[in-house]
Image (cartoon, helix red, strand yellow):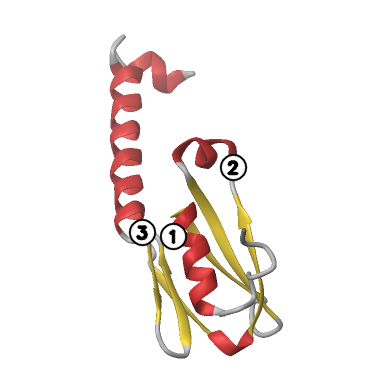
Amino acid sequence: MWIFEALPWWGPLAVLAVVGLLNLLIAESAWRNLGHGLTDGHVIVQTGAVIRSREVLERAGIIGWTLDQSFFQRRLGLADLTATTAAGNERLLAPNIPVPLAVDLADRATPGMLDGFRA
């Protein structure tokens, strides 16, 4: 490739280092912008690194919950909590929440829904 022929021997390493640093900065920004909240009538979730988004779902519209974990999330004790609903996008995803906090959020948002599943 003509681009790499014009670079010195350390050029590809420098490009790799710059891309890795950008990746770390974006990952930290995404981590800092994760958030969720619970009000009297709504569940609120904020995500995003470069483009931030905030989604709000009325608690009365929640018809179920799912808790998903990837291989790496399982090792870190994190999970993706999804509130299912029949309205709008039909789901509200709250990513990378510690598992006990995710279960507590689901239980507080819809009291009594998880009683049959909790020991």
Q: Residue at x 36, y 54 (%)?
A: 30
| Mark 1 in CB contact with mark 2 (< 8 angstroms) | no
Q: Nearer the viewer, mark 1 or mark 2?
A: 1
Q: State which tag comes first along the sequence, 1 or 3.
A: 3
Q: Please tell me whether mark 3 or mark 2 is closer to you in this view.
A: 2
How far is the residue under mark 1 from the one under mark 2? Answer: 17 Å
The quarter of the picture where residue 50 lies is: bottom left
- N-term mark: 1 or 2: 2
In the rendered structure, the answer to whether residue 3 lies left or right of residue 119 reads left
Q: Most extreme residue toward the front, as rendered?
A: 119
Instruction: Tell me if residue 17 comes above or below residue 62 in the rendering.
Output: above
Q: Is residue 91 left or right of residue 102?
A: right
Describe the element under mark 3 as helix, strand or loop: loop
Q: 115 or 38: nearer the eye?
A: 115
Which residue is labeled 3 in the image?
50
Q: Earlier in the sequence, mark 3 or mark 2?
A: 3
Position of residue 9 measured from the top left corner of the image (x, y, whole percent): 31, 9
| Secondary structure found at label 1 | helix
- Identify which residue is drawn at 58% across, 36% down: 71
Residue 36 coordinates in the image, percent (x, y): 40, 69
Task: Say which amino acid is labelled 3.
Answer: Val
Label 1, on which residue?
A: 101
User: Label 1 sits on what residue type?
Assistant: Leu
Task: Name the residue that disc number 2 marks.
Answer: 70
Label 2 secondary element: loop
Residue 57 x/y as whole percent: 53, 82
